[in-house]
Amino acid sequence: MMEDLSLHVLDLAENAVNAGATRVTILINENAARGVLTIRVADNGRGMTEEVRRRALDPFFTTGPKRTGLGLPLLAQAARQGGGDVTVRSAPGKGTRVAARFRLRHIDRQPLTNMAETMIMLALGHPEVDFRYRHRRDGRTFRFSSHAFFARAGGGSAAGPELIKAVRWTLRSGLESIGAT
Amino acid sequence: MTTKKLTVQELARIRERTKALTVLREGAGRAKVTVHMGTCGIAAGARGIMDALLQEIESRGVPDVIVTTSGCAGLCNREPMATVEIKDRPPVKYVQLTPEKMRRILAEHVLEGRVVAEYALAVGSETMY
């Protein structure tokens, strides 16, 4: 069980990296007017066959050796619990797109909690991958691209103290500016 | 939280300082720390472990440690885990970490070369299967 939805986002993005993605798009939309929270993670990794995709939400199915393969089933469970659902679209060679919907004010919806921390781990842990993140909250939008950031601040290197500080500051203040966390 | 904007000039200055370190990705770093970030690791608190590691690198001003993540190593019940690799030494896998343990591992093993044996699972290969 994940403690919050930003951990599910981290898990989905790590899946994308393990599928050989070089670009991972993360879209979060908190829409109070419609009462909906959507999370979409799309990658340009190797993708899944139709057979694998159909079974991707099955907790007793995995493709990895020794892997338990519980990431997507846990997300599906969290979505059902929060009054929503999960859809997975994928094709070999074309990447994968996972979309999760939740009812924003559902009493059993897990909180989003800490997207800044999730994005910091991804950007610094995999500097070779471009993480493109867009977080919309009630009409206000924050955008972040890890490669665009590194192009300005330097990177693709050891996570030095100044770079860590700059990434942390950029994500935290950006999310704060739209009233998100 | 400060609201002061990070200027393009400041970012450029950071780039200049970190440019010299880009070679480290290719293997010249002091050490590499891999935090296991599979579903099991994440559920057990791996993000907090990596955050503690990055905070410690930041507060101590360590410029040359490579931090990355990996998937499930097949020991889900011993998560959160991290592997420390120092050049020309066998990798050491640490298990059941807490942020406090991670900070100590950075200080003693990564920076001073002394393995924290009481937190270590085994010395050997990164891959378990």
Image: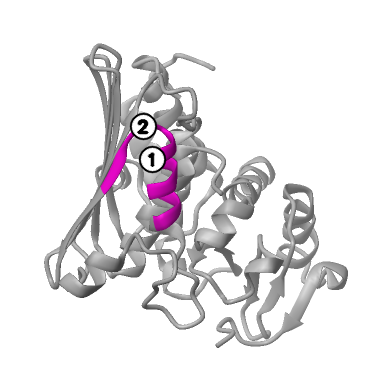
Q: Quadrant of residue A50?
A: bottom left
Asked if the stretch drawn in magenta spans residue A161, the answer is no
Disc number for residue B97: none
Give the residue at mark 1. Answer: A80
Q: Position of residue A48 (x, y in %)?
A: 21, 70
Label 1 SS:
helix
The reply to the same-chain question for discs 2 and 1 is yes
In the rendered structure, are the residues bearing label 2 and label 1 in contact, judged by CB atoms less than 8 Å apart? yes
What is the count of numbered marks?
2
Q: Name the residue rendered at 71%, 65% in the picture.
A: B110
Above or below: residue B103 compared with residue A106: below
Residue span colored magenta: A73-86
Residue at 31% x, 61% y is A16
Depth check: give the residue in front, A19 or B35: A19
Do we see residue B63 in this rendering? no
Classify 10 Å Cα crowding around label 1: few (below 14), some (14-19), many (20 and above). Answer: some
Amino acid type, callout 2: Gly
Quadrant (top left, top right, bottom left, bottom right) of the C terminus of chain A: top left
The chain identifier of the residue carrying mark 2 reads A
- Which residue occupies the foreground of this view, A167 or B16? A167
Note whether A173 is above or below B74 in the view shown: above
Return the x and y of residue B122 as percentages of the image width and height. 75, 82
Q: Is residue B99 left or right of residue B39?
A: right
Q: Position of residue A2 (x, y in %)?
A: 54, 46
Q: What chain does badge 1 belong to?
A: A
User: As displayed, is residue B87 above or below residue A165?
Assistant: below
The residue under label 2 is A83
As drawn, B91 above or below B8: below
Q: Determine the CA span between mark 2 and mark 1.
A: 5 Å
